[in-house]
Amino acid sequence: MRLSPSGLGRRGRLQSRTPRASRAKRSTLISLESILPALGAFGGTFVYASFFEWTLHRFLMHRSYLLRYPFQTHALTHHRLFRHDESYHLARPEDIPKVRFAVWNAPLLIGLHVPLLWLVGRWTGWPMLVPGVLAMTLYYTLYETLHWCMHVPKDRWIEKTSAFRWLTAHHRAHHQLHDSNLNVVLPVADFVFRTLRPWKPPARPATAPSAPAPPVSAVEVGPR
């Protein structure tokens, strides 16, 4: 049986399409195999940051066991200026530096994790370093942004969301109970360590009942 030239052409095109399809499928699988571990490393580091924030907040920023600086700047200064009452929001422009961390805190806290992320990546074979640094950077940026919006409200779009309203109430309760609600961004560690407390507005002082009005006499009323 002899094939016509047109049949040979169709057969050649089918054969050429098959390797192309297999190569495309193989490249898709390769890309997924490289993306999924990176996404897992990013997500895992972001959740880890919740526990790191909780630990740093509780044992360094509210205790003077190891370092005096974080305790001085946070517990003694920030919490003295910003309480759970009306002073929770910024009142004086000169107190703006007491809302944020110092500029050098970000590279220090993120840089401390570079050796740890590298070691975890070597041990697991996952691409931990770049996704991990990106996750820590995002978490720190969210912390500073949300914390700023909580204490310096300006009717921003994010302040109108239900998630932010819950988070700022969560953080305001921390200014009332300093060993509770230690997370600002992701309260996973608060939930795990059972330090999650609801916000309870301070009770207003009861007003004294007004004295009853004196009876009106006929002289005051006058003739009808």
Image (cartoon, grey):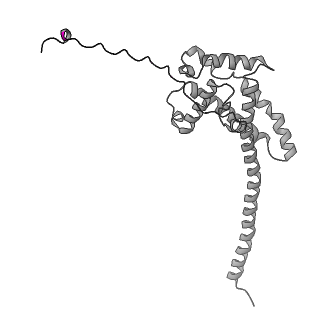
The residue sitting at 68% across, 16% down in the picture is 76
Q: Which residues are magenta?
A: 193-218
The residue sitting at 57% across, 38% down in the picture is 163
Give the residue furthest to the left. Answer: 224
| Residue 85, placed above or below residue 117 | above
The residue sitting at 83% across, 36% down in the picture is 116
| Residue 21, placed above or below residue 37 | below
- Count the marks: how many? 0
Out of 99 and 182, give the one closest to the viewer.
182
Would you identify the image quadrant in which residue 218 lies?
A: top left
Q: What secondary structure characterizes most of the magenta part?
A: loop
Q: Name the quadrant of the C terminus.
A: top left
Q: Is residue 77 left or right of residue 204?
A: right
Q: Name the quadrant of the N terminus.
A: bottom right
Would you identify the image quadrant in which residue 58 lies?
A: top right
Q: Is residue 117 left or right of residue 80?
A: right
| Residue 180, placed above or below residue 94 | below
| Residue 10, placed above or below residue 47 | below
Out of 12 and 28, give the one closest to the viewer.
28
Out of 53 and 137, give the one closest to the viewer.
53
Q: Is residue 25 left or right of residue 161?
A: right
Magenta stretch containing residue 212, yes or no?
yes
Out of 205 and 220, give the one closest to the viewer.
220
The residue sitting at 69% across, 32% down in the picture is 140
Query: Where is residue 39 shown, x and y percent of the image?
Result: 72, 47
Query: Where is residue 215 shown, x and y percent of the image?
Result: 27, 14
Give the residue furthest to the right. Answer: 123
Give the residue furthest to the top. Answer: 219
Magenta stretch containing residue 102, yes or no?
no
Would you identify the image quadrant in which residue 6 lies?
A: bottom right
Query: Where is residue 157 shown, x and y percent of the image?
Result: 51, 35
